[in-house]
Image (cartoon, helix red, strand yellow):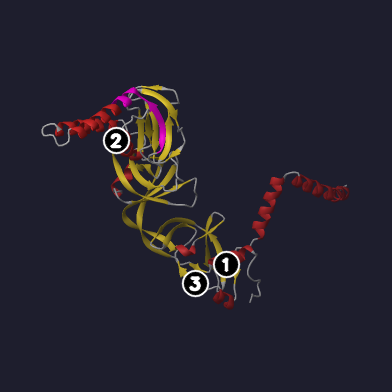
Amino acid sequence: MKTFSRYLLWAALPALILFAGCRAKNNPEAEHAAEIAAHEAEAPASVTLTDKAVAAADIKTEVVAVRSVARRTKAAGELEWNARRVVHLTARTPGRLERVLAVEGDRVREGQLLAELYSPDYLTVQAEYIQAGARARRLAGKEGEEAPARDFLAGARERLVLLGVTASEIETLDARAVPKPLLAVRAPLSGTVLESGVVSGDAVELGTSLFRLADPSTLWACLHIQEKDLAAVKVGTDVVLKTQAYPGEEFRGRLSLVGDVIEPATRTIEGRVEVPNPSGRLKAGMYVDASVAAAGERPAIAVPEAAVQDDEGHAVVFVKTGERTFTRREVEAGEPFAGYVEILSGLEEGEIVVTSGGFLLKSELRKGGLEDEHGHD
């Protein structure tokens, strides 16, 4: 009976293998995962070179050592608009909006026309300015009358400036002596339109909200610094920021403010960092992880920056594990400092890492090794 059962098992084995293969073909994700696993299992972790190959590759090494690094503290935060570069435009006189040329999300430049407003008050102020100019010219040189006439003209000009009329527009009014029918509303800075609460044809009163603009060339990173770290951080210290949107990239700024109030629920205090953003890649509302320079130093395992390579999103080094053998090792890298980078895990003091020629080792490792056990010339 046992012999018969064993016979049935061997007879069914080809069918089982065929069924498993069909299932893999019907599941591309599983097939792809299996291929990756097989490749990783077959991929070598070490490369062995001949003396000649070591010299040709210019392999240089350095012993892993403990070094003194500046202390840093961690903090989370969010990016916000730089409040000093945000403006709220309101109607400076009652009237009716004849044209609205900007909407929320538009990028605008300083001086760009955003809207045009028909305003009887604007027409009146222009007429007063034209009359005051004519009177000042007529009374020029007349003792006792020239000075009051000039003062009246200056007052009329100031009323135009308060309405938002530019110097070039006032010069045009001087030259033509004809009032313009519409008051221009222009952008006072280059940036993004955050809000636009009006449309063409709207009637507005003095103070009606028109636009809110922000200049994104600098942002604020508002950090939540732990109470226990407060004594170690100072205004003016260096801050390194990282975001999920740009993994592996660092954005730098300086701590410009340490708040005066501890948040009771989280026991944190606000820290503000002004972050340059000339390309506009950083966006208000992004979460950031910050590393803030703190007072004092601490010991840390460190290697030269050239020893750490990026391998498909992983930080790796090559460790010398034999006379001419080098092994790929994944590590957790910390902050860079003075040409070195801290290693949080993956290396021990006294090990030897490759500082030059690692790129060649990585390339050859991907090919399956530079040589077999007999060596390679």
Task: Give the Cα distance between marks 2 and 1.
Answer: 76 Å
Which image quadrant for residue 299? bottom left
Q: Amino acid at mark 2?
A: Asp
In percent of width and height, residue 157 lies at 25, 33
Q: Amino acid at mark 1?
A: Leu
| Element at label 2 | helix
| Element at label 1 | helix
Q: What span is in magenta? A: 112-124
Q: Is residue 319 left or right of residue 43?
A: left
* Circles 3 and 1 in contact, beta carbons < 8 Å: no
Up/down of 332 relative to 268, above or below: below
- Residue at the (63%, 67%) spot, across then down: 369
Q: Of label 2 and label 1, which has the lower sequence position?
A: 2
Task: Give the Cα distance between marks 3 and 2.
Answer: 76 Å
Q: Nearer the viewer, mark 2 or mark 1?
A: 2
In the displayed orientation, state which residue is furthest to the bottom.
52
| Element at label 3 | strand
- Quadrant of the snapshot with the C terminus: bottom right
Q: Residues within 10 Å of mark 2 (few under 14, many from 20)?
A: some
Q: Which residue is mark 3?
A: 60
Up/down of 60 relative to 269, above or below: below
Q: Is residue 21 left or right of residue 317?
A: right
Q: Which residue is nearer to you in this view: 257 or 6?
A: 257
Q: Which residue is mark 1?
A: 361
Q: Amino acid at mark 3?
A: Lys
